[in-house]
Image: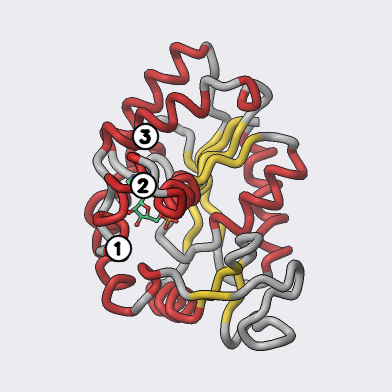
Amino acid sequence: MRVGFLGPPGAGKGTQARELAREWNVLHLATGDVLREAVAAGTALGLTAKGYMDRGALVPDDVIIGLVGERLGARDAATGFIVDGFPRTIAQAEAFARLLKDLGQMLDAVVYFDVSEGELLRRLTGRRVCKGCGRTYHLTSSPPKRAGVCDVCGGELYQREDDREATVRNRLEVYGRQTAPLLDYYRQRNQLVTVSGEGPVDAIRGAIRAAVGAHR
Ligand code: AMP
């Protein structure tokens, strides 16, 4: 199974990718998670990425393409992957196609998560993330049992720097300008499948399974 999850920030790609990667027994490669870990660890990659991330801009293509090339070339990616939040530009999509060709692999599908802008704003500004295990919550639609504390590991919940409203608006604008053109790119290559990203998490997961299964 080799799929990409495409959609605006807050569409639920990460939530679905974490579960489905486990179910399908494939690597979950979320470029945003890799970058946040690098920032937290203070590595050279993190130092490069932080400024872009904090203002909701995209990290330069060559940086992202280098890191994805490294991860997808590794042994744990040989059985398959879900790329989540990558590609985000046409240049990244073209580099991704070249990389897969070099690896002798084919992409099964790119899943587009369709969610209205009002819903995205609501989700992103109310999102809280566990510092310990990365699980996400929402202040009103899926709050933790105890405010500020993760149900699963007891870790502290925090708001991502880039989930503040002004930055969220910028991320949505960047998505529309730089990432949305990928819908046509993958549609023209007959690789795009669309699911509604609104509704219960389990129903969306079922829709993704069905859409990817029918397309393979
Ligand atoms: P995400 O967790 O996917 O919302 O990503 C958080 C931030 O990481 C984005 O706003 C970008 O600054 C950066 N980022 C993640 N993936 C990419 C990518 N494929 N290309 C460029 N920047 C990225």
The quadrant the C terminus occupies is top right
| Residue 27 x %, y % | 63, 35
The residue that mark 3 highlights is 188
| Residue picked out by circle 2 | 46
**Place of residue 122 in the rendered image (x, y in percent of width and height, measured from the top left):** 45, 81
Q: Are marks 2 and 3 in contact (CB under 8 Å)?
A: no
Q: Residue at x 73, y 63 (%)?
A: 202
Residue drawn where x is 52% and y is 20% of the image? 73
Give the labeled residue for mark 1: 54
Question: Which element carries disc 2, helix, strand or loop?
Answer: helix
Q: Quadrant of residue 120?
A: bottom left
Query: How far apart in space, not on screen, are marks 2 and 1 (Cα)?
Result: 12 Å
**What is the CA distance from the residue labelled 2 to the residue labelled 3?**
35 Å
The count of marks equals 3
Residue 6 seen by the camera: no
Left-right relation of 13 to 210 = left
Residue 204, disc: none
Q: Amino acid at mark 3?
A: Gln
| Residue 62 seen | yes
Q: Earlier in the sequence, mark 2 or mark 3?
A: 2
Q: Residue at x 59, y 31 (%)?
A: 2
Residue type marked 1: Asp
